[in-house]
Amino acid sequence: MKKTLRKKYKELRDQLTDQDIDQRSLAIANNLLSLNIWEYTYYHLFLSIAGKKEVDTEPILHILQGKDKNVVLSKSDFQSGGLTNFLLTDNTVIKTNKWGIPEPQGGIKVPPSQIEVVFVPLLAFDTRGHRIGYGKGFYDRFLSACSMNTLKIGVSFFEAEPIISEIYESDIPLDYCVTPNITYDFTQTSDEPPSNIS
């Protein structure tokens, strides 16, 4: 199931033009503005892998900087499967690693427990807030180290799948997922499907 969905959404992304990516990424950033998430201080943001046609997070970065928020970026350790988080400052040096991931090269470390909002990359998600990433588990390990109150916000070019099977206890669900057209709210405690708040 997960393998099939990964293949499906990688193929859908491959069909997107640069203009599609720009327009949809901007629409996602605009939809994020309607969420009640802007009173916090520390926001974790992923930097997009251009070769994988990910959501361009530069418009989100501009919003965060315009609101004078502390932006946190990660560096991946492929041996441990962990992320080290650094505060983005004027002195931060960003380099692309051999997997094509733009990363900070060092700086002021920020513990996961201090991060209040995380923008989460994904390939697919469902109507219950479960996500499919690239299968390495980096974000599940990272999110499990964050506070229980940390908001987890997925961003996706595409809408939700009805349900993703093969969900494990270690899989961390999203609180919201924002697409160009719909904002999904998974914070309800009932068994009802999530509300669309846009």
Image (cartoon, rainbow, N blue to C red):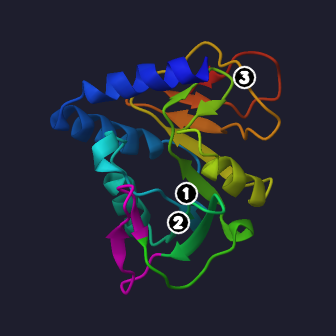
Which residue is drawn at the image coordinates 55% and 35% (left, top)?
177
- Badge 2: few (under 14), some or many (20 or more) residues near its Cα, within 10 Å? many
Which residue is drawn at the image coordinates 57% and 28% (left, top)?
184
In the image, what residue type sits under mark 1? Trp
Instruction: Pick whichever of labels 2 and 3 is earlier in the sequence.
Output: 2
SS majority, magenta: loop
Task: Quickly name the residue at label 1.
Answer: 38
Q: Is residue 164 visible?
A: yes
In the image, what residue type sits under mark 2? Ser
Task: Quickly name the residue at label 3.
Answer: 166
Label for residue 74? 2
Q: Which residues are magenta?
A: 88-103
Name the element at disc 3. loop
Instruction: Pick whichever of labels 2 and 1 is earlier in the sequence.
Output: 1
Q: CA distance from mark 2 to mark 1?
A: 21 Å
Judged left or right of residue 88, residue 50 is: left
Judged left or right of residue 189, residue 7 is: left
